[in-house]
Image (cartoon, helix red, strand yellow):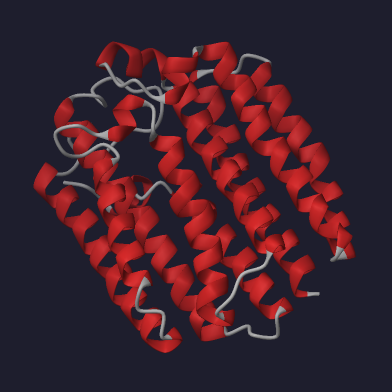
Amino acid sequence: MATVADWVEGARPRTLPAAVSPVALGTGAAVGLDSGSLLRASLAAGVALALQVGVNYANDYSDGIRGTDDVRTGPPRLTGGGAARPRTVRLAAFASFAVAGVLGLWLVALAGTWWLLAAGAVAVLAAWGYTGGASPYGYRGLGEVAVFVFFGLLATLGTTYTQALTVTWQAVAGATGVGLIACALLMVNNVRDVPTDTVAGKRTLAVRLGDRRARWAFVLMITVPLALGLLCAVTHPWAWALLALVPWAVHLSRTVLGGASGRDLIPTLRDTGFFDLAYGLVLGAALAL
């Protein structure tokens, strides 16, 4: 029987900063437009976190029943490791999606942006379809596309729009940057799993690119956002503070390009998540000021 610690690990806390970062950035952009709302920001954060936890449990369930997680280099999974029954993990995923739905409904009701309900429904379907269903797109190398759209563009710009009812080019630049770093988080995770995913037939983008090119893709995914963020310094000088993240990006790049693999990449996975959060907080604060 799974313990509380097992369920916490199953939620993959290393990935959760990627859910908070776009909300912080989007809220900063809204504050800069004199339209910030703590309640709406909190609801947006709740939606993002619930979706992230939901997709993590859904991935655990789907990969587990397919046998993809039978041999892992990372932490054991609930389903694949036999700690919890598959139907229980699936229920946890659906419960997380339900929480996201309730919070999302509350948010769009406050903002009057009812059309965003359709975007939210698509996000839930994409969360399940990543590794679930008859033809999961995550097994065809399209996971980064979904992450970029939903945890980059939609999460950031949706947060801004539900508070300010408009978006700016600076918010778009930041959303693009956040989306790319979220892709980097997925990329380093999949670089770690290339050997086992190849055997299991899971053709992630890292598998398709090959180990070396996937590592360079990771570097681009964390450096291009810094350039995009610094563009915002044209109108928001505090964005120059992003230069403080350059040494961090260099360290992450050296580790990944240096050939770290397997469990040695777990700290990099964690640190990439915090890098994503720092990016959102710093650029969000710059746009607010």
> Relative to the observer, which residue lies in front, 185 or 9?
185
Q: Is residue 214 above or below residue 13?
A: above
Residue 120 lies in what quarter of the image? bottom left
- Residue 161 falls left or right of residue 236: left
Q: Is residue 181 above or below residue 241?
A: above
Residue at the spot 48% in from the left edge and 69% down from the top edge: 45
- Residue 194 falls left or right of residue 282: left
Q: Is residue 51 above or below residue 107?
A: above
| Residue 79 visible in image | no
Count every numbered label the image shows and give the total.
0
Quadrant where the C terminus sits is bottom right
Residue at the spot 60% in from the left edge and 18% down from the top edge: 260
Residue 257: horizontal and vertical position, in percent?
Answer: 67, 18
Residue 53 lies in what quarter of the image? bottom left
- Residue 22 falls left or right of residue 109: right
| Residue 9 visible in image | yes
Residue 211: horizontal and vertical position, in percent?
Answer: 52, 13
Residue 208: horizontal and vertical position, in percent?
Answer: 43, 16
Residue at the spot 55% in from the left edge and 80% down from the top edge: 165
> Relative to the observer, which residue lies in front, 144 or 81?
144
Residue 164: horizontal and vertical position, in percent?
Answer: 59, 81
Residue at the spot 23% in from the left edge and 22% down from the top edge: 70
